[in-house]
């Protein structure tokens, strides 16, 4: 048997070819009675239909949660979820929070040290002391 | 490469009146590869199958709250009401010509609903053939010298069940705890294999003397008897064994199998509803765009011997290992850089802690250099199906891998 | 190198822990930018090299600088000898400068021996007879020395008798039974490392 094949799995590169939005579900919780939900109720009435129309790839659930502060919860493809409390916020501020949840990847926030990461190998290869302009002693 | 009869299949999958429905697909799916374009299923055998097929569960009862619980899978009308399903449709940027009902059907596995008119088996058959067709033509045209074992491994990496299951996860598809008519159609529905059940190796293949486990299986024979990934596959079976197959389906499938079948079914559904260009585009965007380093798929056992045979076959000068550079030979950790030369030309080079290791690595590099040759401006045969395609120029066909 | 040269020139004020006032910190920020700019410019000043191309003779002409990477060559870069005859890259590489000649080739790892093909069928019959009659005396190495060929050739021609193989197996087992855990593990690791060469790991 001269050469054998090694079985592996291809690695996903989201955005190369197809892009899959990582936020798959947004839950909107509000309270009809409490004052802290006033902005949230206004948002649900006036802004949410347009948001849902613009982002059909996100499943949206709206449910009351009496006697609690309003919360927006984002569920992500990697299985994590991210919740933002929007008590006493104006509808415009809630628009920003919703966009934040929509654009998040679901990963834990971490500091990016390198601006670019890539699976492709570098064009010039990994530097080696035994190649290039060797000087003979 | 397999000859595809897409028009004929698509008609049988699309029309609700196609009586042979799942059975024909089943035979094609499980059958060995056929060299001729003739229909693999004999007409008489098909007629018998139709007679034996039970007609009772062909129509689902009307939608009502009580009857939903009796159905094995969600009713067709529920697809329009599922937010999950619509979100999945939009997330994958599926063409609008692909209706939600078909997407819902592609989420129902054969283990959840054995009725071939409501499960995704036929769609998955078509999708699997399209995927393997597009992948194999891409691999063979781009790397014409790849050995067959590596082609099998690359096919497995691109469209193998493990990759497809990972893709379904990355698409955000969730699976239902148990299938049923009341379940949201946006969930993947399949009957799970009970925990602790042992997965038996495939038996009943078309390979002669398959019970002789210690016999050598040549790679060439796996082209004939095995599937696209070099795995054993069930041979064509007679109708009496069909019931056994159904019983096995009722037993359940693994989550990986069900997810892979779903991804294949989506591919088949796009082909049927949106046409060939859309299917090709979907393949390129979702499957071909994934990252695979083909040079990592090689595993040589005797690279120096293979390289020597290769040079003899191609009438090159015999390969000679030469020391390009080295650090202190008597030190504790020396490094040797050895190049393999054939005449004046360097074929490959490698570095190692001993002369033997460096030579072996250099031979591996030289063999990879040979096998990973890729012509310029590669075109695949299916690009001729586009409108206004340039005249076809034959692709590079290689002599084949090194045989020792 | 550049850092070593610039470090002594940096004023003492640039040490931040000696400077508590915010005014100086602003000055420090500016200073930092300047130095990194200077560093960048210094890096871009590459000395012309022979490998860059024929720019020395025509310095005013536009040309492409060819600066080969100091790294091991990629396996995706097919050697010119492996390109098929109809590939356009073959001619392109032949046209490029290639200063290789026989004298500049590095030394071989081991001397190549010319094959002699001097044994005839009667010799081979003799080899087989000796190996069959007295396998303990006539080992592969001894036969190779006597017939002036390689031990590999002896292995190609004939095979040891089953009794001899059994004896050899028992000898090996006796030797291995005296190995401790360290030696056994080291041997196994060596074998695993050898297998990893073929996977290029």
Image (cartoon, rainbow, N blue to C red):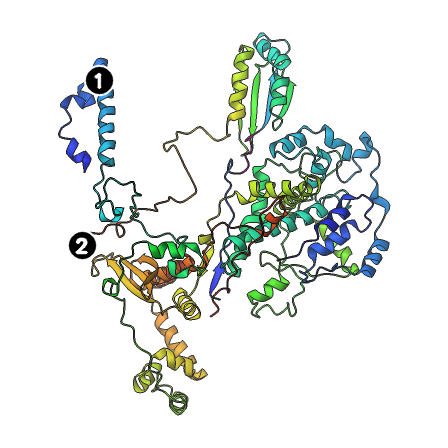
Q: Chain of mark 1?
A: C
Categorize mark 2 by other alpha carbons within 10 Å: few (<14), some (14-19), many (20+). Answer: few
Q: What type of secondary structure mainly makes up the magenta span?
A: loop
Q: Does B10 appear above or below A70?
A: below
Q: Position of residue C167 (x, y in %)?
A: 40, 80
Name which quarter of the figure residue A28 lies in.
top right
Decide if residue A67 is in sight here: no
* Horizontal arrangement in the rendering, residue C39 relative to residue B352 (left or right): left
Q: Position of residue A97 (x, y in %)?
A: 52, 18
Q: Position of residue C76 (x, y in %)?
A: 41, 52
Q: Does B329 appear above or below B56?
A: below
3D distance between C-alphas at marks 2 and 1: 46 Å
Q: Nearer the viewer, residue C123 or A101?
A: C123
Identify the residue under disc 1: C27
Query: Residue most toward the top?
Result: A35
Element type where label 2 sits in the image: loop
Asked if labels 2 and 1 share a chain, the reply is no
Q: Does C137 appear above or below B302?
A: below
**Residue shown at 31%/43% (left/top)?**
C64
Q: Locate the N terminus of chain B and report the quarter of the image it occupies.
A: bottom right
Identify the residue under disc 2: A136
Which region of the structure is painted magenta?
A17-23
């Amino acid at each position: 048997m001269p050469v054998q094949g090694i079985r592996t799995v291809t690695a996903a590169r989201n955005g190369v070819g197809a892009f899959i939005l990582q936020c798959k579900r947004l839950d909107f919780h509000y309270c009809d009675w409490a004052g802290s939900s006033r902005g949230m109720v206004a948002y649900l009435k006036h802004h949410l239909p347009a948001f849902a129309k613009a982002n059909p790839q996100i499943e949206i659930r709206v449910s009351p949660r009496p006697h609690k502060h309003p919360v927006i919860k984002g569920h992500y493809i990697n299985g994590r979820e991210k919740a933002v409390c929007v008590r006493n916020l104006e509808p415009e501020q809630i628009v920003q929070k919703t966009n934040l949840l929509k654009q998040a990847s679901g990963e834990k926030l971490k500091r990016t040290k390198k601006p670019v990461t890539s699976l492709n190998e570098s064009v010039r290869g990994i530097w080696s002391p035994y190649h290039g302009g060797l000087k003979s002693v | 490469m397999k000859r595809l009869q897409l028009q004929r299949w698509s008609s049988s999958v699309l029309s609700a009146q196609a009586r042979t429905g799942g059975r024909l697909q089943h035979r094609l799916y499980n059958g060995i590869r056929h060299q001729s374009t003739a229909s693999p299923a004999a007409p008489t055998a098909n007629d018998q199958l139709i007679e034996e097929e039970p007609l009772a569960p062909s129509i689902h009862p009307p939608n009502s709250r009580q009857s939903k619980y009796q159905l094995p899978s969600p009713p067709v009308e529920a697809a329009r009401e599922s937010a999950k399903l619509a979100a999945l449709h939009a997330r994958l940027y599926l063409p609008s010509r692909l209706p939600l009902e078909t997407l819902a059907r592609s989420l129902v596995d054969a283990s959840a609903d054995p009725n071939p008119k409501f499960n995704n088996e036929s769609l998955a058959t078509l999708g699997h053939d399209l995927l393997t067709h597009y992948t194999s033509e891409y691999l063979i045209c781009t790397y014409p010298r790849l050995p067959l074992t590596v082609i099998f491994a690359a096919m497995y990496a691109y469209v193998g069940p493990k990759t497809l299951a990972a893709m379904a996860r990355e698409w955000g598809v969730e699976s239902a705890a148990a299938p049923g008519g009341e379940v949201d159609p946006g969930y993947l529905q399949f009957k799970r294999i009970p925990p602790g059940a042992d997965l038996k190796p495939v038996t009943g293949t078309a390979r002669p003397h398959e019970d002789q486990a210690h016999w050598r299986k040549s790679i060439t024979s796996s082209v004939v008897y095995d599937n696209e990934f070099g795995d054993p596959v069930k041979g064509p079976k007679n109708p009496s064994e069909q019931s056994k197959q159904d019983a096995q389906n009722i037993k359940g499938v693994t989550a990986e199998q069900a997810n892979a079948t779903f991804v294949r079914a989506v591919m088949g559904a796009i082909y049927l509803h949106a046409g060939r260009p859309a299917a090709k585009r979907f393949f390129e965007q979702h499957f071909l765009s994934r990252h695979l380093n083909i040079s990592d798929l090689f595993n040589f056992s005797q690279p120096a011997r293979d390289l020597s045979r290769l040079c003899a076959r191609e009438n090159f000068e015999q390969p000679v290992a030469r020391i390009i550079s080295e650090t202190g030979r008597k030190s504790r950790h020396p490094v040797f850089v050895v190049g393999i030369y054939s005449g004046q030309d360097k074929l490959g080079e490698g570095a190692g802690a001993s002369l033997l290791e460096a030579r072996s690595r250099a031979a591996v590099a030289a063999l990879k250099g040979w096998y990973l040759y890729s012509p310029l401006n590669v075109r695949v045969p299916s690009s001729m199906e586009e409108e206004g395609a340039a005249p076809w120029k034959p692709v590079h066909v290689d002599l084949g891998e090194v045989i020792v | 190198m550049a850092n070593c040269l610039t470090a002594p020139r940096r004023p003492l004020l640039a040490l931040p822990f000696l400077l508590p006032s915010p005014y100086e910190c602003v000055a420090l920020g500016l200073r930092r930018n300047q130095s990194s700019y200077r560093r960048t410019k210094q890096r871009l000043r590459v000395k012309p090299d022979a490998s860059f191309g024929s720019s020395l003779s025509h310095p005013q002409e536009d040309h492409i600088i060819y600066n080969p990477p100091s790294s091991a060559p990629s396996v995706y870069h097919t050697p010119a000898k492996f390109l098929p005859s109809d590939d356009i890259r073959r001619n392109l590489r032949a046209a490029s400068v290639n200063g290789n000649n026989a004298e500049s080739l590095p030394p071989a790892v081991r001397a190549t021996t010319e094959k002699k093909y001097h044994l005839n069928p009667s010799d081979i019959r003799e080899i087989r007879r000796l190996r069959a009659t007295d396998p303990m005396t006539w080992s592969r190495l001894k036969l190779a020395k006597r017939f002036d060929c390689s031990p590999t050739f002896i292995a190609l021609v004939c095979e040891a008798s089953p009794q001899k193989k059994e004896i050899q197996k028992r000898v090996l087992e006796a030797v291995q039974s005296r190995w401790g855990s360290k030696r056994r593990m080291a041997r196994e690791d060596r074998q695993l490392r050898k297998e990893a060469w073929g996977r290029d790991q």
